[in-house]
Image (cartoon, rainbow, N blue to C red):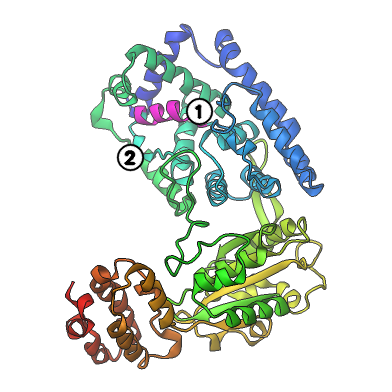
């Protein structure tokens, strides 16, 4: 007997301990106990939150109504723990810092976005983490399961953990929701659905729940690990079944995103808004900083910042460009937060060679309908969605950071935007939809690593649409940083070495100072130099390797004083 058959048989044995003659979802007691109220909740969710209704509420800016409907649906069953609103499964609905407009868009993308649902769940988790909102598995997967019952499974951590361990794949579980775990969870749920001929994922979740509860009764107060050791079918030679692992691995490669879940399920600490200051004890980045604080945090002169901000306001968009390690993205975030102040918002996008017009502006994409089937629809891209939200806060500045902007084919990605960037305030017809204009309160800040592509290679038409703000290696920023962390450290030898090195390198490829802005620099410099700087130099001087010899660690260590001896 194959492994899956053994597992199905073992699951049925557990279910039949509660429902002795269970043979399918038609079992009267099973249907009454497990399915009736869940299907009623699904019907209510489709009435209140179907795609057309949800989009209409968004278009009319009825964000409080959206939140109220989400609360109503969450109360329709006992599946979500709600005893303490500030810490329960629906805590995000009651967060005092909840921006209802942003949240409504995030939930819209979770429920009706164009990406596979594991990726949509991943994006929702990223949104919640970036905004310091409490989140966990139950609430987003509850909504997905009610509105997409053919494809999506409600994930209640304890029974799902038990089930994954029962299957022998417990290692896929993560404490926080994400594509890396939800992809195999959905896969295994579909396998169970097919094996038992179940109508939908609501029935799958009910089977998992009943089996896990029966296993708990059978094994008393054993830990989940102990329960699984007693419950799992004892055919160890067939574990794991390779065809299932291969498919799950392929799904992970296709749908997973690089995301490290926070360590705790409640009120995670995101990296996005708590990045340590570039200069140590200077102010941590936050909304509402004055320009003096931005200058202290970035190490840039006040008059330089004022000039750059005037350029951004004059053009509407600017690009920070410079060699690696000059703090381009770091400074872009500070400028964006200063411009947005307390009422606006900031979004960051990472450009790459595969980025397209369809990703950024709009395109025809497959979308999953309520029946689990795919249909093609014209779908707004990230920039149009950003502008849609910016129009709803016209009095506030909204900033989009385009990181590594020169890594994409910008003429293709921007399309009609090339015209609108030059003629702010005008409108054009987009290729696939109607008339579009950039809201007056939108600002764009790009970053460009000149070691990837020289500014001289950037399209001339694009150059005149942006203000270009140069960032070169700034050794005074390095000094300021170590005054906070290592006030006794003599940086002169290192700075002289960097000046000598950079004098032999084209300015677009010079070595920046952020490589060396480490609080434990005296103990880490050797590793930084050998594992980060020298490989970079080997690439730059690939046909003149003899020019690297004066900068080998063995040749420079003696001249670095204390730092060269560690």
Q: What is the x, y in percent for residue 311?
A: 67, 80
Q: CA distance from mark 1 to mark 2?
A: 19 Å
**161 is within the stretch colored magenta:** yes
Q: Quadrant of residue 335?
A: bottom right
Residue in the image at 44% along x and 10% along y: 16
Q: Over which residues does the magenta segment extend?
A: 155-166
Is 237 on the left or on the right of 380, as rendered?
Answer: left
**359 is within the stretch colored magenta:** no
Is 224 on the left or on the right of 370, as rendered?
Answer: left
Residue in the image at 44% along x and 14% along y: 15
**The label number, if any, that marks residue 193 in the structure image:** 1
Q: Earlier in the sequence, mark 1 or mark 2?
A: 1
Residue in the image at 26% along x and 23% along y: 234
Is 40 on the left or on the right of 473, as rendered?
Answer: right
The prevailing secondary structure element of the residues shown in magenta is: helix
The residue nearer to you, when weighing 555 against 292, is 292
Q: Quadrant of residue 89?
A: top right
Residue 259 vs 134, above or below: the answer is below
Residue 563 vs 386, above or below: the answer is below
Question: Number of callouts in the render?
Answer: 2
Is residue 344 among the parts visible in the rendering?
Answer: yes
Instruction: Spot the residue most to the front.
Output: 488
Residue in the image at 33% along x and 40% along y: 242
The residue nearer to you, when weighing 532 against 18, is 532
Residue 5 vs 282, above or below: the answer is above
Q: Which residue is mark 2?
A: 242
Q: Secondary structure at mark 1?
A: helix
Q: What is the x, y in percent for residue 435?
A: 82, 65
**Is the C terminus in the top left, top right, bottom left or bottom right quadrant?**
bottom left
Is residue 324 among the parts visible in the rendering?
Answer: no
Is 132 on the left or on the right of 103, as rendered?
Answer: left
The residue nearer to you, when weighing 266 against 539, is 266
């Amino acid at each position: 007997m194959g492994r899956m058959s053994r597992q199905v048989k073992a699951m049925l044995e557990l279910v039949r301990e509660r429902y002795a003659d269970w043979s399918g979802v038609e079992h009267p007691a099973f249907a009454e106990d497990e399915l009736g109220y869940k299907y009623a909740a699904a019907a209510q969710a489709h009435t209140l939150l179907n795609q057309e209704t949800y989009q209409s509420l968004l278009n009319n800016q009825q964000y409080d109504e959206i939140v109220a409907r989400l609360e109503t649906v969450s109360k329709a069953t006992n599946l979500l723990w709600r005893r303490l609103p500030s810490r329960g499964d629906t805590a995000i609905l009651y967060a005092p810092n909840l921006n209802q407009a942003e949240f409504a868009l995030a939930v819209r993308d979770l429920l009706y976005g164009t990406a596979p649902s594991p990726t949509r769940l991943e994006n929702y988790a990223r949104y919640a983490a970036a905004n310091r909102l409490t989140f966990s598995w139950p609430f987003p997967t509850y909504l997905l399961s009610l509105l997409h019952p053919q494809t999506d499974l409600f994930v209640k951590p304890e029974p799902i953990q038990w089930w994954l361990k029962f299957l022998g794949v417990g290692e896929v579980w993560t404490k926080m929701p994400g594509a890396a775990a939800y992809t195999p969870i959905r896969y295994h749920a579909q396998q169970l659905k097919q094996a038992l001929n179940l109508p939908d994922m609501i029935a799958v979740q009910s089977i998992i729940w009943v089996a896990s509860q029966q296993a708990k009764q059978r094994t008393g107060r054993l830990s989940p690990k102990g329960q699984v050791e007693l419950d799992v079918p004892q055919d160890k030679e067939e574990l794991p079944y390779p065809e299932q692992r291969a498919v799950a691995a392929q799904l992970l490669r296709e749908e997973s995103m690089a995301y490290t879940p926070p360590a705790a399920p409640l009120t995670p600490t995101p990296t996005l808004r708590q990045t340590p200051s570039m200069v140590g004890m200077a102010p941590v980045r936050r909304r509402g900083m004055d320009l003096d604080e931005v200058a202290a945090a970035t190490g840039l002169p006040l008059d330089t910042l004022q000039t750059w901000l005037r350029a951004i306001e004059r053009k509407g968009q600017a690009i920070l460009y410079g060699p690696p390690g000059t703090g381009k993205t770091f400074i872009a975030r500070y400028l964006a937060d200063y411009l947005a102040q307390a009422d606006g918002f900031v979004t960051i996008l990472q450009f790459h060679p595969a980025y397209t017009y369809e990703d950024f502006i709009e395109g025809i994409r497959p979308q999953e309908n309520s029946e689990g089937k795919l249909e093609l629809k014209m779908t707004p891209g990230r920039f149009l969605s950003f502008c849609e939200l910016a129009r709803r806060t016209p009095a506030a500045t909204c900033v989009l950071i385009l990181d590594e902007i020169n890594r994409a084919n910008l003429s293709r990605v921007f399309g009609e935007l090339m015209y609108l960037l030059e003629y702010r305030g005008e409108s054009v017809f987009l290729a696939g939809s109607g008339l579009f204009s950039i809201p007056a309160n939108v600002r764009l800040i790009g970053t460009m690593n000149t070691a990837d592509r020289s500014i001289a290679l950037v399209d001339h038409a694009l150059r005149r649409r942006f203000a270009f703000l140069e960032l070169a290696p700034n050794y005074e920023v390095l000094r300021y940083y170590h005054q906070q962390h290592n006030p006794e450290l003599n940086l002169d030898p290192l700075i002289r070495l960097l000046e000598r090195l950079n004098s032999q390198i084209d300015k677009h490829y010079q070595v920046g100072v952020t490589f060396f802005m480490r609080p434990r620099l005296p103990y880490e410099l050797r590793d930084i130099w050998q594992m980060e700087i020298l490989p970079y130099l080997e690439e730059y001087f690939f046909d003149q390797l003899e020019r690297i010899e004066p900068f080998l660690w063995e040749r420079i260590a003696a001249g670095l004083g204390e730092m060269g001896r560690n």
